[in-house]
Image: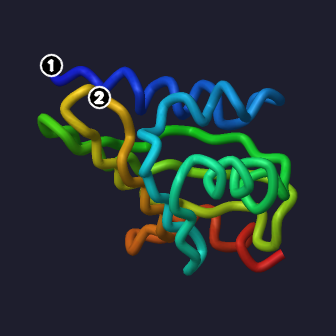
Amino acid sequence: MTVMHSRVTDYFALVDSDDKRRTIRVFASDAEVVDDGRTYSGTDAILDWLTGAASEYATTASELSSTITMNTASVLVRLEGNFPGDLIDLRHDFELDPEGNLTRLAIEVSSQGVPAQHADRKES
């Protein structure tokens, strides 16, 4: 059984908390986040992302699957919330430094898409 990296687990546990400064602690000082076509470099920019774009909507996340190697993790997450379309599957690709801090997070819409049983919700 493969165990998820602790910083990745911490990221998902903290990202929706009110205290975004706790979330930023899982990142290396020179980390970058790529989300929605924009790149946020360094912890100040990542904190701005966490308090801005990443907090724009109220969501509930469910992990669908994950792939883990020594210094990477790819986690497929289903988000449901009050955003256009109400439901989306996102792939979170993490890279970690030797100390286990997150050095890169890239978030993309999953190519697997939303299952057919939810297609009607996607169009609402």
User: Residue visible at 30% across and 26% down?
Assistant: 4
Label 2 or label 1, whichever comes before in sequence order: 1
Q: What secondary structure is found at the residue carrying circle 2? A: loop
- In space, the residues marked 2 and 1 are separated at their CA atoms by 19 Å
- Answer with the quarter of the image where residue 13 lies: top right
Whether residue 119 sits left or right of residue 53 in the image: it is left
Whether residue 47 sits left or right of residue 71 in the image: it is right
Whether residue 6 sits left or right of residue 108 in the image: it is left
Residue 1 is tagged as 1
User: Residue visible at 18% across and 39% down?
Assistant: 71
Residue 104 is tagged as none
Front-lying residue, 94 or 32: 32
- Answer with the quarter of the image where residue 36 lies: bottom right
From the viewer's perspective, is residue 104 above or below residue 10? below
- Residue 1 placement (x, y as % from top left): 15, 19
- Residue 54 placement (x, y as % from top left): 72, 55
- Residue 68 placement (x, y as % from top left): 21, 38
Type of amino acid under label 1: Met
> Which of the image's four quarters has the C terminus?
bottom right
Whether residue 10 sits left or right of residue 66 in the image: it is right
Q: Residues within 10 Å of mark 1 (few under 14, many from 20)?
A: few
User: Residue visible at 35% across and 55% down?
Assistant: 93
Given contact means CB atoms under 8 Å apart, are the residues at marks 2 and 1 in contact? no
Type of amino acid under label 2: Gly
- Residue 88 placement (x, y as % from top left): 61, 63
Residue corresponding to mark 2: 100
